[in-house]
Image (cartoon, helix red, strand yellow):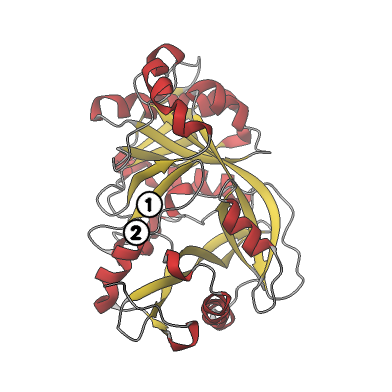
Amino acid sequence: MERQSYPTRELTLAVAGPDDDADLRRLMRETPMGGSISVAFEREPSFFWGSAVEGECTTVVAREPSGRAVALFSHSVRPSWVAREPRRLGYLSALRIAPAYRARRGLLIRGFAHVRRLQDAASDVPPYAITTIVSDNRAAVRLLEAGLRGLPRYTRRDDMITLAAPCWRRRYRPVPGLEVREATAGDLDEIVAALQRFGRRHVFGPVWDASTLTDPARCRDLRVEDFVVATRGGRVVGCVALWDQSGFRQSVVHGYSGALAWTRHLVSLAAPLLGVPRLPGEGRRLHHAALSHLAVDDDDAEVGRAVVGFAADRARPRGYQYLTTMLCERHPLLAAMRQLLRPIEYRSTLYLVSWDDVDGPEGIPHLEVAVL
């Protein structure tokens, strides 16, 4: 018997709690992000473990009268760099709607009304939040950029490039005068200082301090020993971490569309010769880790290649298929990372989301893909 569909006005929306965990995880599994590669970002074994790395996260869940969850809207607040100063900043993370409800404008209006209340209730935040949308998810882009009454304004800010690099090639090359090594607990303060110098020169990136980096919820499964540091004259001038989040966040391929749908097998066969990643089959989980917490003094390309190359070589014996990181298209380090990693690239758009006409700060964004 076909499941009954209810009008939007009969849905109930409420802030999610621990009892909603199973339904939230189901929605994440069943609502992959569209695009040329359709990927579901799962949150096993706990939805709330995955959302905790985003900051102070609140999720609103929509249910039919039967009790079935059909949508979720997440809003988080975390300390970020805004105009060279640490400031709490809103971020719209997970927005998932069951296919039968995606054309229901009323559900979007009601969901975003909850999000607006969360944004307004947050203390000391700018009058906007940020979010990213995969650029070839055209349906979502058209809908959210349409300026529909009752929905917030989505203002394009920058193009962001996610780099997915294969792990079967050695990449590290020594640089004279630069020592590159695995970090130890004694490097924590220097790592924090490097991250803060780098963050201050950009906008919208997380503010990292010692308490956050060692917080078992905010940086779950990340240790100081997962960092690689580059030192010159005994001072840390660059760092990056190899963050395996598979224990609480997973990426599962649901399918391919467009040219990739019929070229995927050819690309995978030729991948070792071309030096590009193989494309996984449908239903397969990507075994990957994030190249997170990147910081490079003065955007020095040699230092950037050294720390990322050293970290990538550490990943090879661990059996990862891919490493992922994100840079703004305008970022000075992007060309060096493309040359080093030879990745598959995924383009997304960074938006300012507001209910009023506002402008954000100037500067090159640097988002942390591991906490989006």
Viewer-nearest of discs 2 and 1: 2
- Local crowd size for mark 2, using a 10 Å CA cut-off: few (<14), some (14–19), many (≥20): some
Q: Which residue is mark 2?
A: 30
Quick check: 126 left or right of 40?
right
Residue pictured at 68% horizontal, 62% vertical: 145
**Residue at label 1?**
40
x, y percent for residue 335: 62, 27
Q: Which tag, 2 or 1, sits closer to the chain's start? A: 2
Real-space Cα separation, disc 2 to disc 1, in angstroms? 7 Å
Determine the image quadrant of residue 113.
bottom right
Badge 1 amino acid: Ala
Residue sitting nearer the eye, 169 or 240: 169
Quadrant position of the N terminus in the picture: bottom left
Q: Give percent across and percent down for residue 302.
A: 56, 22
User: 266 above or below 200?
Assistant: above
* Vertical order, 290 against 310 (above or below): below
Residue 151 appears in which quarter of the rendering?
bottom right
Q: What's the residue at 41%, 73% (across, down)?
A: 59
Left/right of residue 358 with respect to residue 271 in the rendered view: right
Judged from this view, the residue extending furthest toward the top is 273
Q: Nearer the viewer, residue 161 or 28?
A: 28
Secondary structure found at label 1:
strand
Question: x, y (%) of residue 369?
Answer: 47, 48
